Image (cartoon, rainbow, N blue to C red):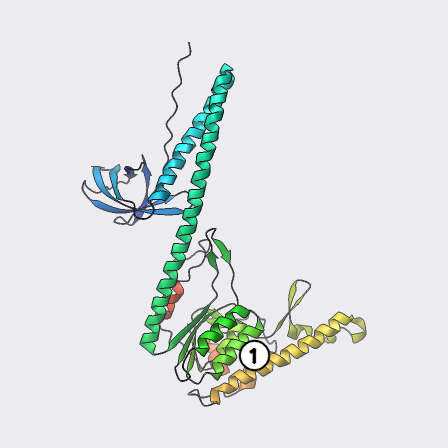
Amino acid sequence: MNEKRKSPRYEHRVTVYVKEKDDYFVTRNLSTKGCFISCPDPFPAGTELNLILNLPGDCNVAVKGIVKHSRPGEGMGVEFTDFGAARRVYLGFLKGLASIRESRAFFEGIREARKENKASKLKETGRKAFSVMEALKSVFMILLMASFFFASLKQHTLEHRRNELIREMEKARGTKVITMIHREETVGFLGIPVKRYIKVEDAEAVLRAIREVPPDKPIDFILHTPGGMLLPAFQIAKALKDHKGKVTVFVPHYAMSGGTLIALAADEIVMDRNAVLGPVDPQFMSGGHVLPAVSVLKIPEHKSWDEMDDSTIVMIDQANKAVRQVEEMVRYLLACKTDGKDGKGVPDPQKIINRLVTGQVTHDYPIFYEEAKRLGLPVSTNMPEIVYKLMDLYPQPSSVGYSGR
């Protein structure tokens, strides 16, 4: 008679952040009552702890506990005293562990049944398989809903903290703060990174915000963008130019292309020492490629008109119009500096137009503070610390390396 084989014990571990120790450790013997935390320097019995359990699926569960027993050099046994609002997620996780153990036992049963050729045992394990799959499905749904909940809560918290800093800046400077920050963020409960740029929807929201500002109230415009569509960028720039109160544009990192066009409407451009502006020369889409309009205009220097097809001739015509139109836009925005505002004006608008529009440099050429100053733009480096704090609340996706400012 074969001796009945004992089912092996499966132990699952997760990382745990002990706030009082400012470090991550591993747990074992997880249950609804508590766990054992492995750490070389444990707290004495009776110590109250604040823990964050990092569960599979990148779910964090805040737990309060108390040290019941302590083993120097090994760790401490902790009894949970409060799960906060994440109790269901944690219980679902434990249920998932039980389902995993049942699944492993099920597959072991399959192997034994094959060896012993017992149909009844196969039928029994089949019923267990169905119950295990149902349990796993429930766990999956719980984790999915928890991910959605935590993502929404995180976004809501960020928005609240951003609005608090904006109100603080408005109170300190006596201005109306408007932001257009296009930083790649993870959105939704799946954490999909989305790249952002200037588009029509931006113009609608920003124009509405500018209209609500009293005519004589100064505007602080915080700008961070890689650029985007020309039309909405110029709409925003024109609205800022027409505002009677002083307009200050803050560029903590970069405002390229359409972002630079918006900055040109300001009475003062405040740049970080390492922040950059960029050229505003128009770009064309052709055959899936982005072509600078100023380069398209050089085609006749290399080909005769007889060698070109009709589409190329049309493109050259459109490129010529686009360059002239952007030159007019820039000239219009620079002229506002002497139109009843506090600014001293731009001494040589054509110098700026030549540098930014006519293709002297590539479209992604960085214009730092020193060059912007030489061009005659009204720039300074008096960046308020609160602007940096606000930018910290627009985190990059976790795949982007970052180790502090």
400 vs 298: above or below: above
Q: Which residue is drawn at the image coordinates 69% and 75% (left, top)?
A: 318
User: Position of 50 compared to 395: left or right?
Assistant: left
Residue that protrudes farthest toward the top in the picture: 1
95 vs 159: above or below: above
Q: Which residue is drawn at the image coordinates 48% and 89% (left, top)?
A: 339
Q: Which residue is drawn at the image coordinates 37% and 35% (left, top)?
A: 12
Question: Which of the 4 image quarters holds residue 46?
Answer: top left
Residue 7 or residue 376, whichever sits in front? 7
Give the image location of residue 231, x and y in percent: 57, 74
Q: Secondary structure at mark 1?
A: helix
Q: Quadrant of the N terminus?
A: top left
Residue 131 or residue 219, whichever sits in front? 131
Give the image location of residue 180, x and y in percent: 46, 70
Give the image location of residue 28, x and y in percent: 32, 36
Could you tell me if residue 71 is visible in this image? no
Question: Which of the 4 image quarters holds residue 163?
Answer: bottom left
Q: Quadrant of the C terminus?
A: bottom left
The three-letter amino acid code for the residue at tag 1 is Arg
Local crowd size for mark 1, using a 10 Å CA cut-off: few (<14), some (14–19), many (≥20): some
Residue 163 or residue 270, whichever sits in front? 163
Could you tell me if residue 352 is visible in this image? yes
On the image, numbered disc 1 is attached to which residue?
Answer: 355
318 vs 188: above or below: below
151 vs 318: above or below: above
